[in-house]
Structure formats: C-alpha cells, structure tokens
Image (cartoon, helix red, strand yellow):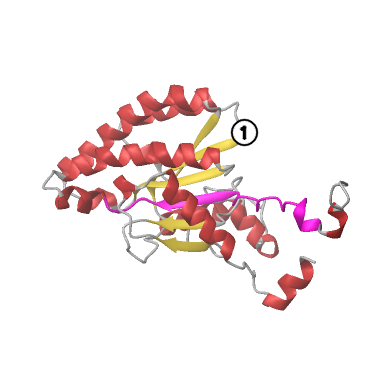
C-alpha cells in the first residue's frame, strides 16, 4: 500500500470550497409589531417602541457583520402623525435619545447616518440630534444607515415632481430629458442604490407606502417575528432566504442561468 497522499486533482471538491454568496448591497426593513408586542405583555405601547430600539441596534450590528453596505429602517412614516399625540411625542423623545446615545457607536463602527423623508417637520431637538449625528458620521462610506423619518413614497414622488417642474420652468430640463434617470436623481434616495431585499416584521404582508419606486425589483420577505424580538439571527435567516431566490429583472430563468455560466 502506498503512503503517498491522495491526488486532490482527482476529486476537486475535496479541496475546493465555493466562496459564500455576496450579501445584498442594500436591505430595507419595515419595523412593525411594537404595539402588539407590548399589548401581548400588558405593557404600554411606548414600552414596545423602547424595546424596538434594541432591535434597531441588533439590525445595525447584524448588517455590518454580514457585509451589507446600506441598511434602511422605516422609523416614522408620514402617516404616523395620525397616531395619538402622546404616542407621537413619546416616539420623538425616543428618537432623540436614541440618536444621542448611539452616535458614538456609529462613529466607533464607522457607519454613516443618512435620512430620507421630510425631516424639517420633526421637532427641533430631534433635528438637532440628527444634524449632529449626520455630521459626525459623514466621513464614513463603507456602511450606511438610512433612517426613513416622516417618509412616504407618495410624498417623495410629489416632491420629486415639484423639483422636475421647477427645473423645467427654469429651462434646465426639457420634456425629452425627463427619463427614469432624471427622476431617480431627484428622489430622496438619489445617491443610494435600490434595495435588494425588503423585510417586514410582524407577519403583515403590505409595504405601507415604503420605497415604492426603489423596490421595483427587490425581494420581499415577511417574517412573523415582532420587531422588538428581531435579532441578528432573524436578519441572517432573511438573507439566507434571499440567496435561495432567483432574481430575474424581467428575464427568464434560462437567461439568468446562461449569463452566470
């Protein structure tokens, strides 16, 4: 019997390990279920929002650990102003203190903070904390956290149409030049890649006026996990499911397979 080592070339799989699939570049999350989480435990709704802040931290850490470059969190919609005023006020206080507490962590982890939405309508203390956090994290580009605040896609589209109208009236944009690229350049997300994956927690299956244009080709995953219970493992599970999907962008499966060979 020969003592020579086995010939690895005869069985390439014995020595060849396929690289892991590339993570999605941009993941967007509709954070839902804070109120139900609190109600199930006999707690005030605001306590659910407080516990939801822990899930925000877990999502940020998980996204960075998995190499996800852009993470967008639907933090406060333009329709959320309709909620009871004490809840809205509590949410704004939580947001202010979250920003005050987490800015140092964002800087330490070299995560840039951005916002989308009409943030000029937020309370002055929140705007001040946002401005400070955005300025402190501006030098970082590898990972970006985007908070959607006072955001709604219909409002975003309305604002975009107004910008186009202003440019057209000024003579800097002709009708023939109004292309998708021209529209995209005037959205709140102008320099942010479209989301690859949109996750909604709490089991609800709707997108609630969130990134309607940008998510045209995104994969959607609806998880029953309530947002305060969402952890890095839940994000990893969603990304794993994303990798099992075949993104076609209007092509057939055969075309996608042929282009990857």
**Residue 75 sits in which quadrant?**
top left
**Nearer to the camera, 83 or 19:** 19
**Residue situated furthest left in the rendering:** 42
Q: Is residue 32 magenta?
A: yes
Q: Main secondary structure of the magenta part?
A: loop
Q: Nearer the viewer, residue 164 or 149?
A: 149
Res 179 quadrant in image: bottom right
**Looking at this rendering, what residue extends furthest in the front direction?**
1
**242 over 258 or under it: above or below:** above
Assign the C terminus to one quadrant of the image.
bottom right
Horizontal and vertical percent position of residue 180: 64, 61
Q: Is residue 245 magenta?
A: no
Q: Residue at x 16, y 48 (%)?
A: 84
In this rendering, position of residue 35 left or right of residue 215: left
Using the image, determine if residue 145 lies above or below residue 13.
Answer: above
At horizontal 16% and vertical 52% (from top left) the residue drawn is: 40
Nearer to me, 144 or 8: 8
**Does the rendering let one see residue 208?**
yes
Left or right: 93, with 182 as reference point: left
* Kind of element beneath mark 1: loop
Q: Return the residue nearer the eye: 133 or 152.
A: 133
Q: Which residues are magenta?
A: 12-33
In the rendered image, the vertical position of residue 81 relative to residue 247, given as above or below = above
Residue sitting at x 25%, y 48%: 34
Provide residue 11's location: percent of width, then percent of height: 81, 59
Q: Which residue is mark 1?
A: 141
Give the percent coordinates (x, y) of residue 225. 33, 55
The image shows a total of numbered marks equal to 1
Q: Is residue 161 visible?
A: no
Q: Crowding near pointer 1: few (<14 within 10 Å), some, many (20+)?
A: few
């Amino acid at each position: 019997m020969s003592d020579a080592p086995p010939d690895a070339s005869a069985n390439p799989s014995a020595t060849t390990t396929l690289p892991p699939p590339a993570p999605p570049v941009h993941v967007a999350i509709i954070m839902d279920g804070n109120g139900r989480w609190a109600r199930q435990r006999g707690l005030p709704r605001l306590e659910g929002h407080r516990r939801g802040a822990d899930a925000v931290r877990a999502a940020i850490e998980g996204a960075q650990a998995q190499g996800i470059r852009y993470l967008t969190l639907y933090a406060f919609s333009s329709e959320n102003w309709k909620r009871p005023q004490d809840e809205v006020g509590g949410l704004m206080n939580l947001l202010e203190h979250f920003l005050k507490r987490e800015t140092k962590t964002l800087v330490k982890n070299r995560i840039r903070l951005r916002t989308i939405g009409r943030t000029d309508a937020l309370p002055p203390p929140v705007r001040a904390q946002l401005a400070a956090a955005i300025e402190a994290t501006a030098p970082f580009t590898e990972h970006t956290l985007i908070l959607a605040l006072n955001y709604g896609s219909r409002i975003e589209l309305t604002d975009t149409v107004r910008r186009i109208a202003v440019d057209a009236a000024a003579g800097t944009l002709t009708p023939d030049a109004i292309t998708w690229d021209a529209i995209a350049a005037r959205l709140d997300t102008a320099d942010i890649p479209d989301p690859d994956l949109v996750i909604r927690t709490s089991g609800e299956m709707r997108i609630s006026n969130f990134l309607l244009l940008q998510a045209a080709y995104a994969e959607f995953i609806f998880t029953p996990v309530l947002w305060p219970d969402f952890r890095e493992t839940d994000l990893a599970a969603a990304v794993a499911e994303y990798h099992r999907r075949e993104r076609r962008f209007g092509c057939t499966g055969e075309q996608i397979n042929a282009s990857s060979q």
